[in-house]
Amino acid sequence: MARDHAARRPVPPGRNAWLTVAIFLAVQGTGAQKVRVEDELEAYPTESVDLRCEFIDRGGRTKLTQVSWIWEPVDGQRDNIAVYHPMYGQSFPNGLFKDRVVFLHNNLENPSIRISELKMSDAGRYTCEYATYPSGNEQGTTSLVMLAKPKNSANAVTVQAGPQSVVVAQCEAADGKPAATIKWTSSLGGNHTTSTTNGPDGTVTVRSEYRLVPTPADNGREVTCTVEQRTHQRPWVSAVKLSVEYPPSVSIEGYDNNWYVGRSDVVLVCKVDGNPPPTDVTWTAVSGALPDTVVVSGNKLTVRKVDDAVNTTFICGVKNMRGASQHQITTYVIDTERRMTPGPSSGAVIGGILGTLAAIGITVAIVFYIRKCREDGEAPPKHKPPPPVKAGSTTEMLNKPSEPPMPTETAPLSPGEVYYEPTGGEPVTNLDEETSGALNGGAPPVLHDPVGYDSVNEVAADGQRGNNLDSSYHEQPAANISRGESFVSPAMCGK
């Protein structure tokens, strides 16, 4: 009962926390690394490197017997290179490190070593191993990475112009570690191949070749090689000028078609293009030997005084290691100097062309505008004179202001209905508004002249009821114009 009660009794929170910390420290102390070393170091050939090692014993219960440094160049190979014993001293059993390894401190707690005159083959894992009591061996391992700056170079390969793709440039990063990366930059459209070669000391040589189909135009153009490697703070860049050899091409300049008798010091120049540059330039004449007035200096032929002897054909011939070429020109001697009429300046020619184009543009715009106006029908129809007025027409009646208006008592007539005058006059046909307007040239309808009024008073009274119709009797129509015609004179298009 008491035991069960104690088992069920809860543990105080503070006590539980302290218990957790104690367990954590115990586990940490048990699995902690007692040999302190650096994980990785980088070094270069001919330099020195310090491999540090320190034994950490917080409890002071471990007894150190001996310490050894073991080198592992590859997996499975372990070579003891340095040993320290407090009683027997230092030992360096490996001949590869003899006179290159020393202990920095003469004690077991800090058996750090220094390796001098490093070689690429010194790369590998270095283990600091303690022989201890009672826990046995304790160790820590440092990886030594040997770096080698590559020897970079880039050069052009002299080639001959031709139809086949060949190597025109090379770039190399030799004896580097780790291996370098080579890239090419060019606008020539070639391609490249890259190869690697491993050295006996672990270094790597990378070679890259740039290839293209060479033409004379490629001579002197550049391709760029870029090398990137771990030891470089920035990429190594080198521009390479291509060297493409080709046979020479020749042209002769200086003849102006104005070699007149008595002219002095006229010069012909032999222009040559070739790679390698031609060194052998010769001048000859078709007629035989060169005239006595001719002097040759390299690629220049000078005529001291023009006469009939230089009325011939001159030939310039050149050679290089890739071939030979020649060019000829015929010179004509005239009696008198030909006066050269200066042509118009380029500014005047350009101005004339621009003025002509402007005039053409304006003309086209005007023609287009006129045609547009005609198509849109903006111009009104032409005016036609009114036809002659017939006797007894409505317009003639309108010109009789003295006749009284139609009595208002008469009932209005329907369109097309015939009305007969009481006095036996001619029948009157009622016109609708549209028809009467057409007959009167677009004027308002005109009432027929009646004769059925008894007195002047009826006429006056009826005139008041008709809203002063007598005013229309005194206004003469402008013209007798048929329907659909215009009395407005034609206007200009666009106004």
Image (cartoon, helix red, strand yellow):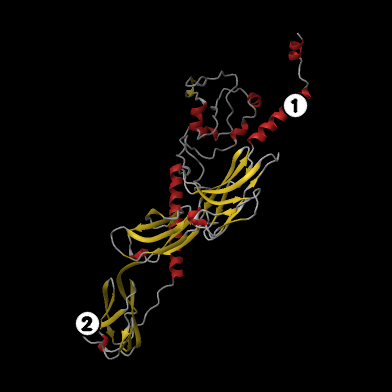
Q: Which residue lies furthest to the top in this view?
A: 1
Q: Residue 244 falls in which quadrant of the image?
A: bottom left
Question: What residue is drawn where x is 77% and y is 22%?
Answer: 13
Q: Is residue 90 left or right of residue 312?
A: right
Q: At which x and y percent is residue 429? A: 48, 23
Q: At which x and y percent is residue 388? A: 45, 39
230 lies above or below 462? below
Question: What residue is drawn where x is 29% and y is 62%?
Answer: 162
Q: In this view, does 271 lie to the left or right of 177?
A: left
453 lies above or below 193? above
- Identify residue type, mark 2: Val
For the N terminus, the image quarter is: top right
Q: Which structural element holds mark 1?
A: helix
Q: At which x and y percent is residue 143? A: 54, 48
Q: Which of 226 and 342 is in front in this view?
A: 226
Q: In this view, does 221 lie to the left or right of 464?
A: left
Q: Which structural element holds mark 2?
A: loop
71 lies above or below 414? below
Nearer-N-terminus badge (1/2): 1
Q: Residue 154 falls in which quadrant of the image?
A: bottom left
Q: Is residue 343 left or right of residue 335?
A: right
Q: Nearer the viewer, residue 462 or 158?
A: 158
Say which of marks 1 and 2 sits in front.
Answer: 1
Which residue carries the number 2 mark? 286
Residue 229 shows in this picture: no
Q: Which mark is residue 17?
A: 1
- Identify residue type, mark 1: Ala
